[in-house]
């Protein structure tokens, strides 16, 4: 990681409030933060390149080319520079992918994301592994999750994606919907279809998938807690009856709560360790109460996404909601009427000069 406080520097663009800069900065923060899942650090050069892209001095394609040229010109590299090379290249690619609106919910999309992230980094980019794997995990005292057998990967992928595609979120509470999303992420990650880069590819896929519901994903979760995300996935897929350890998605659900609902659960990796002693784990994981309590509301994921945007900006206009959620103006109007009918929001001081008030 560069000596500079990259989180603080990129956060400044969000504080300035310009929509284009904010979106770019959030993508870069997520991209850089995700490198921690594999213990990688980015370089100071990557941070400078990200800032130039955020400020509009270069395009994202030019940012990628700049990073590529930087390492091509350095014929004698230290071991640290070899490590930052992967982190820098993949960070720029994640930032590009997160800035794209196109998305198709399918195993092919996930494989395509992996290929686009790791082409030229791994020889197997975008390819399903042809061998079985184990990985020693700190959180499991060196034990491993049981990953899918290589011969069943394609069938398992097709099964999990088909089930999710047929699943209806209609009528679910927000809390139940978030729990389901966490379980789906856990299930596809356990397949581990690739030799390396599974967690980063899973994160990018899930972010893009959740955006189809209209969510503006909270980048803080991946920016600051990407290793927690990986450890939570591990704990969601590990059972050892002799040690009294059972697979649980509760840690992953807290991560997704912070990611989507604005909760502020304290995400500490030590709480996930199978030997952690500190009373009941669910009580030892403290959470701050957010300004608005959205997780218990009777609304759809689309309605929740709009509600969060209104809470963040009470003066937001319908066209701005269209841009932020990717939904049509007709859909936004329908959602706003539904939220008003449920007494979750109300308009103050008229249509033209008024503001929205969240009343939950």
Image (tube, grey):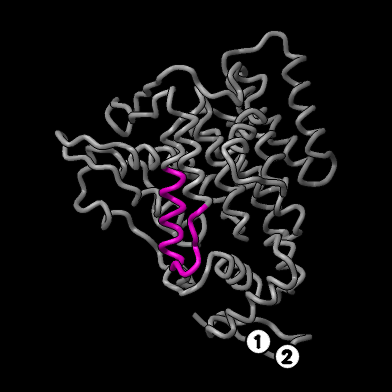
**Residue 231 falls in image quadrant:** top left
**Residue 4 falls in image quadrant:** top right
The residue wearing badge 2 is 350
Q: What element carries label 1?
A: strand
Looking at the picture, does residue 345 appear above or below residue 214?
A: below
Within 10 Å of disc 2 (Cα), the crowding (few <14, some 14-19, many 20+) is few
Image spot of residue 102 (x, y percent): 71, 46
Image spot of residue 243 (x, y percent): 16, 35
Image spot of residue 122 (x, y percent): 60, 19
Looking at the picture, does residue 13 appear above or below residue 272?
A: below
Image spot of residue 67 (x, y percent): 74, 26
Which residue in the rendered view is the most extreme toward the left? 242
Which residue in the rendered view is the most extreme toward the right? 57
Taking the spot 51% from the left edge, 34% from the top edge, the residue there is 36
Residues in magenta, as a range: 166-186
Q: Is residue 168 magenta?
A: yes
Q: Quadrant of the N terminus?
A: top right
The residue wearing badge 1 is 347
Q: Which of 328 and 277 is in front in this view?
A: 328
Measure the alpha-carbon separation of dots 2 and 1: 7 Å
Q: Does the magenta stretch include residue 226?
A: no
Taking the spot 72% from the left edge, 85% from the top edge, the residue there is 354
Taking the spot 59% from the left edge, 49% from the top edge, the residue there is 209
Which labelled disc corresponds to residue 36?
A: none
Q: Nearer the viewer, residue 234 or 276?
A: 234
Do residues under tags 2 and 1 come within 8 Å of each other at their CB atoms?
yes
């Amino acid at each position: 990681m560069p000596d500079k406080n990259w989180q603080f520097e990129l956060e400044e663009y969000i504080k300035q409030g310009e929509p284009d800069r904010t979106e770019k900065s959030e993508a870069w923060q997520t991209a850089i933060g995700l490198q921690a899942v594999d213990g990688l650090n980015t370089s100071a050069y990557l941070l400078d390149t990200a800032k130039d892209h955020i400020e509009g001095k270069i395009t994202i394609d030019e940012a990628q080319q700049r990073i590529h040229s930087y390492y091509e010109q350095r014929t004698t590299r230290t071991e640290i520079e070899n490590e930052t090379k992967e982190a820098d290249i993949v960070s720029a690619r994640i930032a590009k992918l997160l800035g794209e609106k196109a998305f198709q919910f399918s195993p092919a999309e996930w494989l395509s994301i992996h290929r686009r992230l790791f082409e030229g980094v791994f020889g197997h980019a975008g390819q399903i592994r042809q061998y079985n794997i184990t990985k020693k995990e700190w959180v499991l005292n060196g034990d491993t999750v049981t990953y899918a057998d290589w011969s069943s990967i394609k069938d398992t992928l097709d099964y999990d994606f088909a089930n999710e595609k047929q699943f209806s979120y209609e009528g679910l509470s927000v809390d139940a919907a978030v729990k389901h999303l966490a379980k789906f992420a856990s299930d596809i990650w356990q397949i581990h279809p690739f030799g390396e880069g599974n967690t980063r590819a899973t994160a990018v896929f899930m972010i893009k998938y959740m955006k189809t519901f209209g969510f503006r994903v909270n980048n803080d979760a991946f920016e600051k807690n990407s290793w927690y995300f990986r450890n939570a996935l591990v704990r969601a897929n590990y059972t050892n009856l002799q040690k009294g350890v059972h697979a649980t998605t509760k840690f992953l659900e807290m991560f997704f709560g912070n990611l989507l609902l604005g909760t502020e659960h304290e995400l500490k990796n030590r709480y996930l360790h199978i030997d952690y002693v500190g009373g009941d784990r669910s009580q030892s994981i403290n959470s701050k109460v957010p300004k608005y309590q959205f997780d218990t509301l009777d609304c759809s994921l689309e309605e929740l996404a709009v509600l969060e945007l209104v809470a963040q900006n009470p003066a937001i206009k319908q066209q701005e909601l269209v841009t932020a959620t990717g939904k049509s103006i007709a859909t936004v109007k329908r959602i706003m009427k539904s939220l008003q009918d449920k007494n979750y929001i109300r308009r103050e001081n008229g249509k033209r000069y008024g503001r929205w008030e969240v009343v939950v």
